[in-house]
Amino acid sequence: MAIETHRKIKIIVIWTGLLVGLSTGARCVASDRVLVVYSYHQTYEWVQDIHSSIQAVLGGLDVQLKAFYMDTKRHPTVSWKRQAAQNAKALIRTFEPRVIIAVDDNAQFYLARAYVGHPSIQLVFCGVNAEPEKYGYPASNVTGILERTYPAQTLKVLKTLMPSINGIAVVTDDSTTAKIMRPRILKRIGKLAPSINLVEYETPDTFSNWMQVISRLDQDPRVDAFLVPLYHTVRRDGDDTSLASKDVMRWTLAHTGKPVVGLWPSIIEHGALLAVTVDPSEHGLEAARMTKEILSGKSAAEIPMRTNIDGYVMVNLRDNAHFVFDATVQVDQIADLVVR
C-alpha cells in the first residue's frame, strides 16, 4: 500500500532543552530587529523545533532576535489570550521590530492580524491551520507557510500495519487549532470509506469529560482505534489551566486496549503507536528564510505564501509491542523513524 507522504525525512532531531530568546550581532537598530511571537510555551516540543530552526538561519546574521511566548495551550481561556496579545503589543512598541514572525493560529487571531497593512512592520507566519483569509492574508506586508496535517495518511499507515482496523473514533481537545482542523479531518476521513469509517468525533474540554469519552468508546465494539489529533488544552476540572499533555495521553493509553494514533511527533514521545506528522523544522526554516529575504530588501508581498510539503512516518514499537501487526509488513520500510 502506498504511503502518501510528500517527502520522507530520514534524519529527525528532537530537541528537549529549554530554549530562550537570542540576541546576535553587534549592531542593534530598529531596521534589523526580528520578534518571534509563539502561540504556545517555550518548552512545548513544536515550539522548540521551530525556534531552533529559526536560530539556525538567522542566528548568524547581524540581527537582534527576540522571542515572546503567549502560552495559550497551558492557559486556553480567551481572557488569557487577549492579555497575552496586549503584552506582546507592548513589547512591539518598545522593541520596534522590522519583522514579526507569528507562529500558529492564536498568534494570528489575537495579535498579528492587527498589523496587516502596517507601514513599517512586515509579517511572516507559520504553523497556520486556518485559511489565511481568516486573518486578512494575503496582504501587502504578509507572507508565510500554512500548516496542513496528514490524518488520512496516518490512518492508511495504521490500516497497513493492522488490516482489521475499520472503525475510527476521533477524540481531540476543543482548542482553537482543533476547531479549525475539524472540517478538514472529517473530509479526509470521509474519503477513506468503506476501508476506514468514522464512528464518532468527540471534543471533550475537561479531564473528567475526556475520561468519560475514552472509557465509553473503548467499550464500543464499533471502534477499533483512536485518532487523537490534539490533547494539549484539556482543562483541569474547575480550573482554567490545562493538564500536562503527557499526563492526558498516559492516562488515555493506560485506559484503552485499542491503538492510538496522532498527527504530531509529541504523541509518539508520549507513547502512542504512530503518526504521519508535519515537520516543525520545515515551518521554522521557511519562516526564517522568508524573513532573511525581507531583511535583504524584499517586501513580504514579493514572497509567495506556501504550504508545508514535508511529512514523515513515525512508529512506536517500544510502547506498543502488545499489538499484532500484519506479518507481511516490514515496519522499517514504511516508517522514517521507528522507536524501539
Image: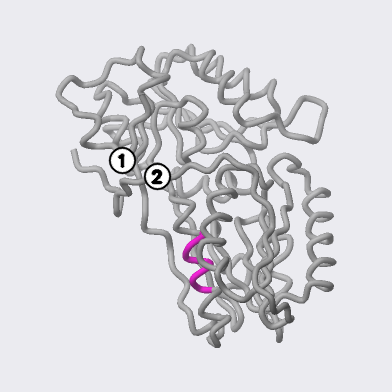
Question: In this picture, is 130 found above or below 8?
Answer: below
Residue corresponding to mark 1:
336
Give neighbour class at mark 2: few <14, some 14-19, many 20+ (Cα, 10 Å). few
Kind of residue sitting beneath label 2: Ile
Name the side, left or right, on which 132 lies relative to 107.
Answer: left
Residue type at tag 1: Asp
* Res 13 → quadrant: top left
Quarter holding residue 65:
bottom right
Which quarter of the picture shows residue 310? bottom left
Q: Nearer the viewer, residue 96 or 313?
A: 96
Is residue 54 located in the magenta-colored stretch of the structure? no
Image coordinates of residue 175 in percent, x first then y, are: 64, 43
Report the span colored magenta: 284-290
The quarter in which the C terminus is drawn is top left
Residue at the image point whose x is 37% and y is 36% from the top: 314
Q: Nearer the viewer, residue 266 or 155?
A: 266
Q: Nearer the viewer, residue 288 or 110?
A: 288
Q: Which residue is labeled 2 in the image? A: 12
Q: Position of residue 191 (x, y in %)?
A: 32, 44
Seen as rendered, the residue at the extreme left is 328
> In 3D space, how far apart are the residues under numbered discs 1 and 2 (Cα atoms)?
9 Å
